[in-house]
Amino acid sequence: MSTGGWSTLRITLVLYPFGAGAMGVNVFFAGLIFSWLGAPVLPTLWSFALGCVIGIPATWAFARHIRRLMAEAEDATAG
């Protein structure tokens, strides 16, 4: 596979705000589901903070996937 184009780190940094936001929403909704089981509702600030933390590995994994797809597309067009 080719290594041209954006690096995984650069893709991660560009997509991180979206990944952190998505993880924050997921944590918030998971907190709402757990409230049905009697747990306290997770405050918005905690959802935001946990989303920022969980967003790092989630965005990195997604960026690796995108980088792999980009390399496959480059190889397909080159040969």
Image: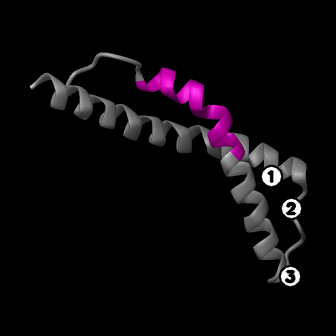
The residue tagged with tag 3: helix, strand or loop? loop
Report if the CB atoms under discs 1 and 2 are less than 8 Å apart.
yes
Query: Which percent across, then down, holds residue 44?
Result: 88, 52
- Magenta stretch: residue 9 in it? yes
Q: Please give the name of the residue rendered at 22% of the width and 22% of the height, measured from the top-left corner.
A: 2
Can you identify the residue that label 2 sits on? 42
- Magenta stretch: residue 35 in it? no
Q: Residues within 10 Å of mark 3 (few under 14, many from 20)?
A: few
Query: Which percent across, then down, holds residue 40?
Result: 90, 71
Q: Amino acid at mark 2?
A: Leu
Q: Please give the name of the residue rendered at 67% of the width and 50% of the height, measured from the top-left corner.
A: 23
Name the foreground residue: 16 vs 40.
16
Q: Residue furthest left?
A: 79
Can you identify the residue that label 3 sits on? 38
Q: Please give the name of the residue rendered at 80% of the width and 52% of the height, measured from the top-left corner.
A: 47
**Image quadrant containing the N terminus:** top left
* Image quadrant assignment for residue 36: bottom right
Of pointers 1 and 3, the one earlier in the residue sequence = 3
Can you identify the residue that label 1 sits on? 47
Query: Which percent across, then down, holds residue 39?
Result: 85, 75
Q: Please give the name of the residue rendered at 76% of the width and 65% of the height, measured from the top-left corner.
A: 29
* Image quadrant assignment for residue 52: top right
Spatial separation of the CA atoms under disc 1 and disc 3? 18 Å
Name the foreground residue: 28 vs 39.
28
Spatial separation of the CA atoms under disc 1 and disc 2? 7 Å
**Image quadrant containing the C terminus:** top left
Q: Which residues are magenta?
A: 8-21
Q: Is residue 54 left or right of residue 63?
A: right
Report if the CB atoms under discs 1 and 3 are less than 8 Å apart.
no
Query: Which percent across, then down, holds residue 31?
Result: 79, 66
Report if the CB atoms under discs 2 and 3 are less than 8 Å apart.
no
* Image quadrant assignment for residue 5: top left
